[in-house]
Image (cartoon, rainbow, N blue to C red):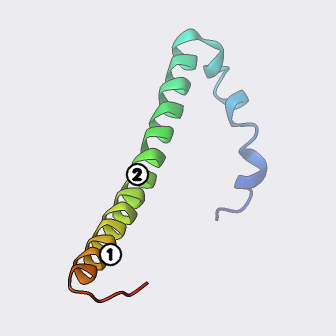
Amino acid sequence: MIPGLGSAAPALPLQLGGLLGEPLGQALAVIAAIAVVVLVGRIVLKVAWRLVTIAAVVIGALLVLSFFGINVL
């Protein structure tokens, strides 16, 4: 971490001359927030799809084993 960056971060919007005070600055902030939500959502959905796929394979394997009379559960 860069020394002194932690204390300067809250003052960053003030140093930018009120960037978020303008309508285009606010629109940029909203679009950036939406982009963060979309990126986090993609990561969460990627993990969720893997879990669903693993569960489907396990349940399918248990079903096939039950057809042959092997009760695992």
Q: In this view, does 10 lie above or below 45?
A: above
* Left or right of 45, for residue 34: right
Expressed as whole percent of the image width and height from the top left, the position of residue 70 reads 29, 89
Nearest the viewer among 36 and 66 is 66
Q: Which amino acid does label 1 sit on?
A: Val
Expressed as whole percent of the image width and height from the top left, the position of residue 28 reads 50, 23
Expressed as whole percent of the image width and height from the top left, the position of residue 56 reads 31, 66
The numbered dot on residue 58 is 1
Q: Mark 2 points at which residue?
A: 45
Please report the residue visible at 35 percent of the width from the left and 57 percent of the height from the top: 49
**Residue 25 in which image quadrant:** top right
* Left or right of 16, for residue 41: left
Question: Crowding near pointer 2: few (<14 within 10 Å), some, many (20+)?
Answer: few
Please report the residue visible at 79 percent of the width from the left and 50 percent of the height from the top: 7
**Residue 72 in which image quadrant:** bottom left
The earlier-in-sequence mark between 2 and 1 is 2
Expressed as whole percent of the image width and height from the top left, the position of residue 5 reads 70, 54
* Element under disc 1: helix
* Element under disc 2: helix
* Left or right of 24, for residue 72: left
Q: Is residue 46 above or below residue 65?
A: above
